[in-house]
Amino acid sequence: MFDPNLLQKIRAAFPRAATDLNGRKRAFFDNGTGTLVVAKASKAEAKARVDCSANTGADFNESRKAETVILDGREAVADLLNASSAETIVSGESATALLFNLSYAVGRALTGKENIVSSDYEHYANISPWQELKKRRKIQEVRFARLNKDEGTIDMDHLQGLVDAKTKVVTVTAASNVLGTKSALKEIRKMAKEVGAYFVVDAVHHIAHGPIDVQDLDCDFLVFSGYKFFTSHGSFLYGKEDNLRTLKPYKVAPAPDKAPHSWEWGTRDQSTFAAVHGVTSHLVWLANQIQHHYETDFTHYADRKRSLKIAMDAVEKYERSLSKAVLYGFDDLQGLIDMQKVKIYGLTDLNRLSERDPTFAFKVENQPDEKVVDRLWTDAGIATRAEDFYSRAVECYSQQTMIRISLVHYNTLQEIGTFLKTLGKVCKSNR
């Protein structure tokens, strides 16, 4: 899907794809912690910061322009997600903040007898806000569906057994930020709807890896963060119009009562909206490069919505080739599954690569995680890290940390080759 010429253009769109701020050549494999910023986003952000620094709500030019930039950004996010309108898009400081605000709004209508169901590979941003309701005695418990540990997937039978008539929210990540596993969202949605529960999706990790259609998913809420999506910090939450209208979020008294403004705390940052609009512009550009491959695909979408679906579908297909290379190797290089001292967590089946994002957690036998990460960096310029990644999954495998690499569409086979070659040497080394 991405020929060498196009991949070169993609990397050129990201000023730090090849070298860091000091000019060191490196491969950036830490995208799960935060992606590199695309130039279209950074330029749009800087321009909006200067040209539209005035607050909204006044008659003069800078104020009016700020309103336009914010609306344009909302519409871009709505098109990215195939949301029904810009009014369904709420912005916030972070996904954590948005999920806390959502949990408070849901909790205000509860009796203390309800439960919330989630999974054992969630990020704590999608755990602690719901556990807070238990602490405040707004719900009885938060239940966690266990994992099939051999493959890093949710035990769907266990999840089904946790959902009952008292379940108020079923909330899962679209893809694990440690294991890379994609959740079976439509199947989980069905479980939630059968008992009248809200279905909430944490798309923070998956947003950069494939197309999302909130109307097709029929989710009640979905959240993602800009810094995991080629732009700056700041996050966005989609909510069905009825939910945004009927739930009562905490807000200051003079704030508007109408969504999305009733859900937003404080003055909006116009540059955040300009930046995310810049990301969608990059994706539209990408779609224009490859749309001849999609003449009969995604025709039920129109204009920018179709372009964004084409671009993210192409990204997903390209990244599948990266996943295959990481796991199975290429050009006589061993992949992770053939390195005897490497323990991989998550799906490795060649026939199931469509069920995962290109995110891989592993450990090297008899070598501390930080030592391996340091060798990858000092010996080959592979930028990655080892930690718990705020994920419950790490605990479920009885580990304190794991090494993680996470790739996106500006990463290359050549970079993966360098990684595999270096890791192979590390595995054979005693130092």
Image (cartoon, grey):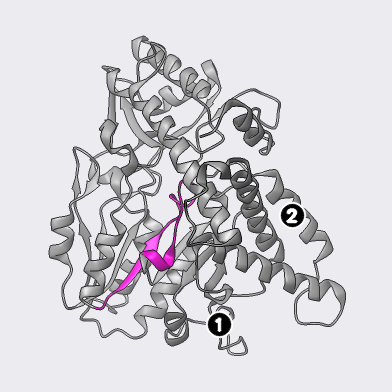
Which residue lies at the image location 45% right of the left edge and 42% below the top edge?
316
Query: Which residue in the protein does label 2 denote?
Result: 44
Predominant SS of the magenta segment:
loop
Viewer-nearest residue: 142 or 165: 165
Residue 363, given in percent of the width and then of the height, sits at: 32, 28
Residue 362 falls inside the magenta stretch: no
Residue 222, given in percent of the width and then of the height, sits at: 43, 65
The residue carrying pointer 2 sits among few (fewer than 14), some (14 to 19) or many (20 or more) residues within 10 Å by Cα, namely many
* C-alpha span from label 1 to label 2: 26 Å
Which residue lies at the image location 43% right of the left edge and 83% below the top edge?
242
Query: Which residue in the protein does label 1 denote?
Result: 262
Q: Name the amino acid, label 2.
A: Ala
Q: Which residues are magenta?
A: 196-216
Q: Quadrant of residue 252?
A: bottom right
Element assignment for label 1 = helix
Quadrant of the rendering where the C terminus is positioned: top left
Q: Nearer the viewer, mark 1 or mark 2?
A: 2
Count of labels in the image: 2
